[in-house]
Image (spheres, rainbow, N blue to C red):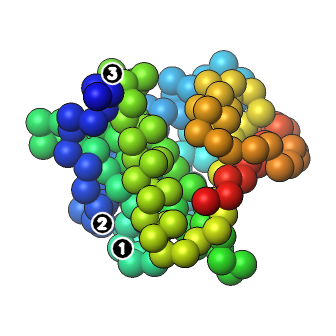
Amino acid sequence: MPEGSNQPLRVAVPADAERCKELGVIGWETTYSGYVHEHNRRAYLNGDFWSIDRLRTVLADDSAVNLVVEQGGRVIGFITTEALDDGRYEVTRLYVDPEVRSRGIGARMLQSVFDELRRRGVAEVIVNVFGDNHAGRRFYERHGFQLSDDVWCMVGDQRLSDVWYSQRL
């Protein structure tokens, strides 16, 4: 049994927003520092997508599948999804504390999301990652996602490759 299967997994709630933001900031700093300039990381992390209010709203959305994994009563990983108008769902955030990465926690959260979305009759899930996020790309490819698009996006004053993946459920 993978090590990541030992920690409690539960539905995320708005009270988890602060810790989820902390994990997001840590994730951005440890994952993207090699190619997203510091001033652009800071600006994005201080923007709407990572605001505590937005996170609370996302975590309160009953139509979404949002989960956290805890260790010793502390959130060490989380995943958020959002329903799209076309019936698909998007994985919008998946972060695991760097201290416990590569232990199956992210895979467990993703599989739990897949299971719940299948139960709901959802046919497809999408996700995007920066093109230079090779570890993220490998993670999603290992879990059955197929490359569907590669577009340019702006993060602050920086133009970056943004790759989109899809997974049929």
Q: Compare marks 3 and 1 and give the one earlier in the sequence.
A: 1
Quadrant of the frame with the C terminus: bottom right
> Which of the two discs, 3 and 2, sits closer to the camera?
3
Q: Disc 3 marks which residue? A: 99
Quadrant of the frame with the N terminus: top left
SS label for mark 3:
helix
Q: Nearer the viewer, residue 12 or 55?
A: 12
| CA distance separating discs 3 and 2 | 24 Å
Q: Disc 2 marks which residue? A: 14
Is residue 102 positioned above or below 122 on the image?
above
Mark 3 residue type: Glu
Question: How packed is label 2: few (under 14 Cα within 10 Å), some, or many (20 or more)?
Answer: some
**Residue drawn at (36%, 73%), measured in percent from left and top?**
60
**Residue drawn at (86%, 48%), measured in percent from left and top?**
149
Is residue 169 positioned above or below 120 on the image?
above
Q: Compare marks 1 and 2 and give the one earlier in the sequence.
A: 2
Q: Disc 1 marks which residue? A: 60
| CA distance separating discs 3 and 1 | 27 Å
Q: Position of residue 151 (x, y in %)?
A: 87, 47
Mark 2 residue type: Pro
Q: Is residue 155 left or right of residue 44?
A: right
Mark 1 residue type: Ala
Q: Compare marks 3 and 2 and give the one earlier in the sequence.
A: 2
Q: Position of residue 42 (x, y in %)?
A: 57, 39
